[in-house]
Image (tube, helix red, strand yellow):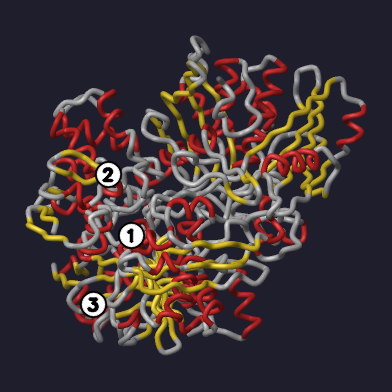
Amino acid sequence: MKSKTVSLVRRRDFLGGVFSAGALVLCARVVDSAAAAAATNEGATWQPSVYLGLEPDGRVIIVAHRSEMGTGIRTALPMVVADELDADWKRVTIQQAIGDKKYGDQNTDGSESIRRFYEPMRVAGATARTMLEGAAAAKWSVPAAECQAKNHEVIHAKTNRRVGYGDLVPLAAKQLVPAKESLRFKSPAEYRYVGKNVPITDIDGIVTGRAGFGMDARVPGMVYASIERPPVFGGKLKTCDDSEARKVTGVSQIVTVPPFKPPHGFQPVGGVAVIANNTWAAMEGRKKLKVSWETGNNAGYDSAAYKKVLQETARQASKVSRNEGDVDAAFRNAAKVHEAEYYVPHLAHASMEPPVAVAEFKDGKVTAWAPTQNPQAVQDTVAQAVGIKPQDVTCHVTLLGGGFGRKSKPDYVAEAAILSKQVNRPVKVVWSREDDIRFDFYHAVAAMYLKAATDQKGRPTAWLQRSVFPPIGSIGDVSARYGTFELQMGWIDFPYDVANFRAECGPAEAKVRIGWLRSVANIPHAFGVQSFIDELAAAAGRDRVEYLLDILGKARQIDLRPPAGRNGPDPYVFDVGRLRRVLEIAAERSGWAKKKPGNGRALGIAIHRSFFSYAASVVEVEVADGKVRIPRVDMVLDAGKVIHPERVRAQLEGAAVFGTSLALMGEITAANGQIAQANFHNYPVARMTEAPVETHVHIVPSDAPPAGVGEPGVPPIAPAICNAIFAATGKRIRELPVKRQLA
Amino acid sequence: MIRLTVNGVMKQYDGDPAMPLLWYLRDLLELTGTKFGCGAGLCGACTVHLDGKAIRSCQTAMSGAAGKRVTTIEGLSVGGDHPLQNSWRTVNVPQCGYCQSGQIMQAAALLAEKPKPTDREIEGAMQGNICRCGTYERIRQAIKLVAGVKA
């Protein structure tokens, strides 16, 4: 059975009784290289990743094991299964999985749900369909090849007989599981759902207010908690006078959350929790606490001084991340040299639903309900926090009111579990917006230095780029100073045809919790590289599109894997031809050649590949009285094969707004170790009039393997906006956000 | 004792009159369609109707709701088929969906007052409602679809 990609199992209590006893349950198993290695090491079996159940009454149950935070993944992956199964979508029930390693990776980030699970999902669907056809053939004693599954029935055309899937369940369960190699997959012409506009699973719940977000979770006997946390990262409670807090009606207890033990990981930062019989009473009680803190090592953190340190570091030679040719010699002999520095501040995620969780500690086990991107991390983090085993933590995943990477880190769920253990009741921890902004895992501030030598045509002959930022690795290793995977995000994966190239990374010490935010280090890196290219083109007096195409060079494939890792073709090789193509389409769709700057209005362009997808953005800005308006954005994405084009368009529309927020107004600063922003008045995000008025999305048709969608639209937006501002006003923006720089 | 109607049902409340309507709806009545987003009247996620007008329930004390009619997203229509709820479906507005109750309630109050709003009027009414997923363009479309004005 182990050698099979899909195995048939019959168990009553999968998912705690979701399926009836008679259900045919398919357990598709998938293993990626990392998991395979782990399995070998631990002698464990392969990790199943997806479950599909067929009930005798004809219901098809598809388990969504990835988290829904607005991408439509709870619809798109089940569509793949249902399509290959040829199921009637109206008879499909989607069941959200709890956190469990048997599903494989559940951390819904990295724009990888479709990329990693398209194949296992269609294998699951095709396997079930094949077994249903086999069951019908057995029932009618005809060759299986004459039986065809169609829309929840198997049909024998010759004799005009048909039987519903539900009726076939007992027989299908006795069929041998076909080998993956023997499966026939649908051709795109046969698709019933893939590539179509299927309404999202949760649409009715959302528009009627009945959809269940983490904020809406409630269990009997639950109490509410609001936590006062140390204002400086690494700070500890010194004294707490809670006498006034206890007098607030509804407040029942005041409980301490212990400080974390370094390295931080995803632990809570500690603090004092006010427990009450409703959210408001807990928040009111908290206001009455008189707390003093030991501020710890980061009390001197001042983001303005820190910025200068990062910028100075970026001017010094640093650790080499990639080196081609001889940059130094080329600079010595260059006719013309250009230099520029760029800066992107810390950013907060600010999902509309602040962190929130319900947890119940009972009999040495924890049950949690949380809007989490990563229920398995909830198991690990909660287990560590309350001293139990991860398998004794059950994490129910609610809908997420936005995530953007913040909700991969389950500190807020651990808080609920710690408190529940102390008060012996289920506890709901509700973060205020101020808590969310001040205790985030921040997108890393980055300072960049870029230098290029150019020939007579303005084409770069040598290119040096240096990036300095506190690494995400610092949450797991307090001594971490250099980025690792961040450098694969738009820094060493440099596709331009420049003979001499060096990418470097300088050291930076983290002063706050660093985390990933929608498209991560691609944000600063695309901003730096795409702005610098625009500067070089401007210096040469060349059209940006023509210049970009010139320096990209001819369509070719760049294998970015280290030589030792180049075993066989890379399905996600860097294909410069695809990047050229999105650029050309964006230029065409936006009317690039026809629209000339004037009256404060102009276009800007940027391209970027991330999460294996190729993106180009043309942004039209209108600058008046120091304010930027964005009448139009054109987004082109080549994400390989696309499952739900309508949701892909939605993601790109959203990416344009997200990118606009960080370009124009996003900024987290600190003084005396404390975050200066607190709510939407001083951490603004784009509202209706600030967002692009129209976003036109073009998806490049492709049969290439599916790549990322949720994030790749974000990186090109900020540089495209700033390049447009330059074209409109002559003002070059080298530091984000634009904010007051045009006043 | 504070008396009010919530979605057509008479209610009595004898707790702290300073409690925001938001938490009364969510924690006491379990009407969780109205969302907590900022607690400061900055994001619009908590928008409900008070005597037909869109208000921020996080900034409205229970004392201010006394004797008034409160309508939440759950009570906007009987069958979940208010024209805006339908147009939200048609245009596939939501992404994560968290802010959408507030968006729909804000838009419903706008259309009740101005059935055919101009672009400027739509922006004026909706500017206080944040959508971090960035569904603004579709919100605008969905409102115009109901208003029957050119998108």
Disc 2 residue type? Arg
Q: Nearer the viewer, residue B55 or A399?
A: B55
Instruction: Looking at the picture, tell me which residue is in the foreground, A438 or A369.
Output: A438
Callouts 1 and 3 close, C-beta under 8 Å:
no
What amino acid is at disc 3?
A: Glu
Q: Name which residue lies at 42% across and 78% down.
A: A420
Is any atom of residue A84 visible in this view? no
Q: Position of residue A198 (x, y in %)?
A: 28, 51
On what subunit does the disc labeled 1 rest?
A
Picture coordinates of residue A388, whole percent (x, y): 52, 85
According to the picture, the residue beneath numbered tag 2 turns out to be B56
* Contact, mark 3 vs mark 2 (Cβ under 8 Å): no
Label 1: element kind: helix
* Mark 3–mark 2 distance (CA, rounded to whole Å): 46 Å
Q: Position of residue A103 (x, y in %)?
A: 45, 73
Q: Judging from the image, what secondary structure is the residue with disc 3 in?
A: loop
Residue depth check, mark 1 versus mark 2: number of the one nearer the observer: 1
Q: Residues within 10 Å of mark 1 (few under 14, many from 20)?
A: many
* Dot placed on the residue nearer the N-terminal end, 1 or 3: 3
Amino acid at pointer 1: Trp
Tell me the distance, in whole angstroms, between the alpha carbons under discs 1 and 2. Answer: 15 Å
Q: Quadrant of the C terminus of chain A?
A: top right
Q: Residue at x 67, y 36 (%)?
A: A343
Residue at mark 3: chain: A
Disc 1 marks which residue? Answer: A280
Label 1, label 3: how far apart the Cα atoms are: 45 Å
Which residue: 57% across, 43% down?
Answer: A668
Q: Is residue A376 above or below residue A453?
A: below
Give the residue number, with chain letter if any, for mark 3.
A55
